[in-house]
Image (tube, grey):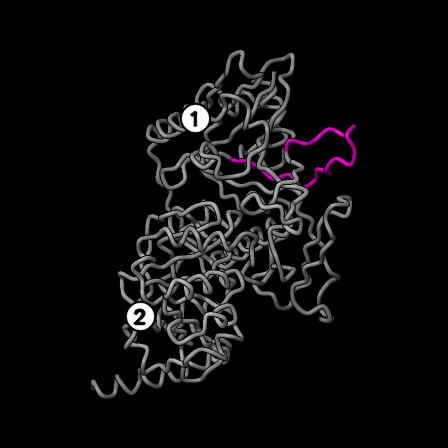
């Protein structure tokens, strides 16, 4: 008989459980070696069940709970031993050294614990423990150095465990390695990643779960955990208001981006380039997002679509052109233009693939000057993301904010409005349910719809889209990297002078 410990909480009214990826487990090299529940060897193809050998993944990492055989001393004592043996669970339940002997009394199993047995169909029982939410970003940085707020002036690097022969060792260096005033390079190994996962996503098999959670009856029993968490939270009726400074907000963003980049590298979910750190992830199976986007009624009605120039959205740009949509792609290097415009009516069918690339867009597209942007109406904006909260619609790009600025300029020039749908296409590993709402400011662009290779998610639309550029957030580097801003500011000043 085994017991599964599930810390549970409510995030935006959705019951969640804390699960983990365990990257420390070495996959089997022979038939005599037992297979870990966290790793599954498969010969299935990545996409669509095809037999393309180049896309075969030898390993897939699965989310797994804390699980242990029940000790002779009983299930409660077993749960206590599981908690004492984990740094993250000790932090989660605020267990100190002096608490270990009386841990059963400290945790109050009678007050906020629920044991669920399954009967003869399985040898597992669940121990659900309600706790106030502690962010997965906070839990994943216990005993880990924080990622730098800036990629400059830092020698913090991230490396995979050299003991795992299936993973190529990577050193993801941040900043200038030649700086004399900095200490020697610090390598950080991430072998465990903890995430709050929606019980609804687990029951619907929208996330990769291990064989423990796939036991007969467990998925159906999770509905009992859902209802218990909801009723228990209603009885507490607590509301926590947290105020965060700009520095802590930047640290949360840095942690969230680094965590997602680490997970995607370790799970081999990136096509190229490597390392993904500092970039928009070009994730595997991204063409499947085009199929899901096509299901949207808004896409079927749309005439003009603006799509970011990232590699992960290249197939989406090609698909939109093939569907007869007028495509707008940002032109950041041109002084007086905001977009390249591609109309499939004026493109040869053999040029569509080239037109979807960055170089092809510049060669085949028509430059749309700032003064002409207002003549367009953009129906859908597809923005690139590194991290997305699929519940609230909060998102983080790679940190430069160009997508937010381009949308704000479109809004001021009248090319889009509240009816314009804001979409992002991401991998499932880029979804972070507890990305806090505090990361969003008035100049950040949220999303209405999140599309992954597996599904379409409509967010709660918790935030308003920026309606104008806030020049207080525009620094000199941004002005240099987006020369169109200088011309846009000049035109705005001229317009203001005319009004006065």
Asked if the residue under mark 2 is in contact with the one under mark 1, i.e. CB atoms within 8 Å, the reply is: no
Label 2 residue SS: helix
**Who's the residue at 28% across and 77% down the image?**
375
Residue sitting farthest toward the left:
500
The residue under the point 35% across, 48% down is 458
Is 189 in the magenta? no
SS for callout 1: helix
In this view, the residue in front, 90 or 161, is 161
Q: Is residue 268 left or right of residue 236?
A: right
Numbered circle sitting on residue 411: 2
Q: Which is nearer the N-term, disc 1 or disc 2?
A: 1
The reply to whether residue 132 is visible in this rendering is no
- Residue tagged 1: 225
In the rendered structure, the answer to whether residue 86 lies left or right of residue 177 reads: left
In what quadrant of the picture does the C terminus appear? bottom left
Question: Distance from label 1 to label 2 (Cα)?
Answer: 44 Å
Alpha-carbon neighbours of circle 2 within 10 Å: few (<14), some, or many (≥20)?
many
In the rendered view, tell whether residue 488 sits above or below residue 55: below
- Is 291 situated left or right of 304 in this image? right
């Amino acid at each position: 008989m085994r017991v599964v410990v599930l810390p549970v909480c409510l995030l935006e009214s959705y019951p969640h459980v804390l699960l983990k990826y365990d990257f420390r487990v070495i996959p089997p090299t022979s038939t005599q070696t037992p297979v870990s529940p966290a790793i599954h060897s498969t010969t299935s193809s990545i996409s669509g069940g095809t037999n393309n050998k180049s896309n075969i993944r030898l390993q897939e990492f699965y989310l797994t709970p804390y699980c242990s055989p029940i000790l002779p001393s009983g299930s409660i004592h077993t749960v206590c031993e599981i908690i004492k043996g984990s740094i993250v669970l000790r932090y989660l339940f605020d267990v100190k050294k002096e608490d270990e002997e009386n841990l059963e009394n400290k945790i109050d199993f009678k007050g906020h614990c629920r044991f669920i047995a399954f009967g003869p169909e399985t040898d597992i029982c669940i121990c659900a423990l309600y706790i106030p939410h502690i962010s997965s970003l906070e839990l994943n940085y216990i005993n880990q150095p924080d990622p730098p707020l800036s990629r400059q002036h830092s020698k913090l690097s991230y490396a995979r465990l050299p003991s795992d022969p299936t993973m190529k060792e990577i050193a993801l260096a941040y900043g200038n390695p030649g700086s004399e005033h900095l200490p020697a390079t610090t390598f950080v190994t991430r072998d465990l990643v903890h995430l709050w996962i929606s019980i609804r996503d687990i029951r619907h098999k929208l996330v990769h779960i291990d064989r423990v959670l796939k036991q007969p009856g467990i998925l159906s029993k999770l509905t009992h955990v859902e209802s218990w968490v909801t009723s228990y939270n209603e009885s507490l009726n607590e509301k926590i208001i947290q105020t965060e400074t700009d520095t802590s907000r930047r640290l949360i963003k840095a942690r969230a981006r680094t965590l997602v980049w680490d997970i995607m590298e370790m799970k081999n979910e990136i096509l190229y380039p490597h390392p993904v750190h500092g970039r928009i992830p070009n994730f595997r199976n991204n063409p499947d997002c085009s199929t899901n986007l096509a299901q949207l009624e808004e896409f079927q009605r749309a005439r003009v679509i603006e799509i970011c120039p990232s590699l992960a959205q290249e197939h989406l740009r090609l698909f939109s052109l093939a569907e007869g949509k007028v495509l707008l792609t940002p032109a950041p290097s041109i002084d007086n233009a905001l977009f390249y415009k591609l109309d499939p009516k004026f493109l040869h069918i053999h040029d569509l693939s080239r037109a979807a690339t960055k170089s092809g867009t510049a060669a085949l597209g028509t430059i749309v000057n700032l003064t002409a942007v207002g003549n367009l109406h953009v129906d859908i904006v597809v923005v690139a993301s590194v991290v997305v909260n699929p519940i609230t619609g909060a998102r983080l790009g790679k940190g430069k904010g160009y997508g937010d600025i381009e949308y704000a300029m479109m809004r001021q020039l009248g090319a889009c409005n509240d009816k314009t749908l804001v979409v992002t296409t991401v991998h499932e590993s880029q979804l972070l349910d507890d990305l806090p709402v505090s990361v969003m400011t008035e100049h950040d662009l949220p999303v209405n719809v999140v599309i992954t290779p597996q599904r379409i998610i409509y967010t709660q639309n918790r935030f308003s889209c920026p309606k104008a550029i806030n020049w207080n957030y525009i620094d000199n580097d941004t002005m240099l990297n987006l020369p169109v801003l200088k011309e846009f500011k000049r035109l705005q000043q001229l317009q203001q002078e005319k009004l006065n």
